[in-house]
Image (cartoon, rainbow, N blue to C red):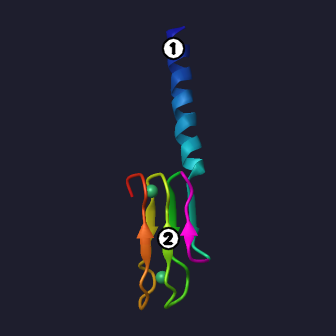
Amino acid sequence: MRRVLLLLAMVALLVGVFASAALALSFDCSDSPCYGTRDGNIIDEQTGEGLADHIFSLKGADYIDASDNSGDVDEVFGNQGAD
Ligand SMILES: [Ca+2]
Ligand SMILES: [Ca+2]
């Protein structure tokens, strides 16, 4: 019985981990301003030289990369979370 409970606890933990990972979006901005979701996101700036990006990642621990293009000035707002 104890092993079954331990197994069920492990399954519940893994489901929680994978469910939260599935909610995280990874995308390139297609316009400016560009918004993330309430969950952790991986956001890249728009493709193209000289495009000023205004990226608002919102809640969650986000990774934002606005260094792909040179010659532009981007603004990045991490909001809440360990960004
Ligand atoms: Ca840019
Ligand atoms: Ca954030």
Q: Is residue 49 above or below residue 15?
A: below
Residue at label 2?
Answer: 55
Q: In this view, does 54 lie above or below 61?
A: below
Q: x, y (%) of residue 64?
A: 44, 67
Residue extending farthest right: 30
Circle 2: element type: strand
Residue found 62% across the figure and 76% down from its top = 30
Q: x, y (%) of residue 61?
A: 43, 53
Quadrant occupied by the C terminus: bottom left
Indicate the amino acid at tag 2: Ile
* Figure quadrant of residue 73: bottom left
Q: In this view, does 81 lie above or below 70?
A: above
Horizontal side of 67 relative to 12 (left or right) equals left
Q: x, y (%) of residue 58?
A: 50, 58
| Residue 22 numbered tag | none
Residue at label 1?
Answer: 3
Q: Which of 14 and 51 is in front in this view?
A: 51
**Residue 24 part of the magenta segment:** no
Q: Which of 19 and 14 is in front in this view?
A: 19
* Figure quadrant of residue 18: top right
Q: x, y (%) of residue 22?
A: 59, 49
Residue found 44% across the figure and 62% down from its top = 63
Q: How far apart in space, not on screen, are marks 2 and 1 (Cα)? A: 48 Å
Mark 1 crowdedness (10 Å alpha carbons): few <14, some 14-19, many ≥20: few
Indicate the amino acid at tag 1: Arg
Mark 2 crowdedness (10 Å alpha carbons): few <14, some 14-19, many ≥20: many
Bounds of the magenta span?
Answer: 31-38
Residue found 43% across the figure and 70% down from its top = 76
Q: Is residue 4 above or below residue 31?
A: above
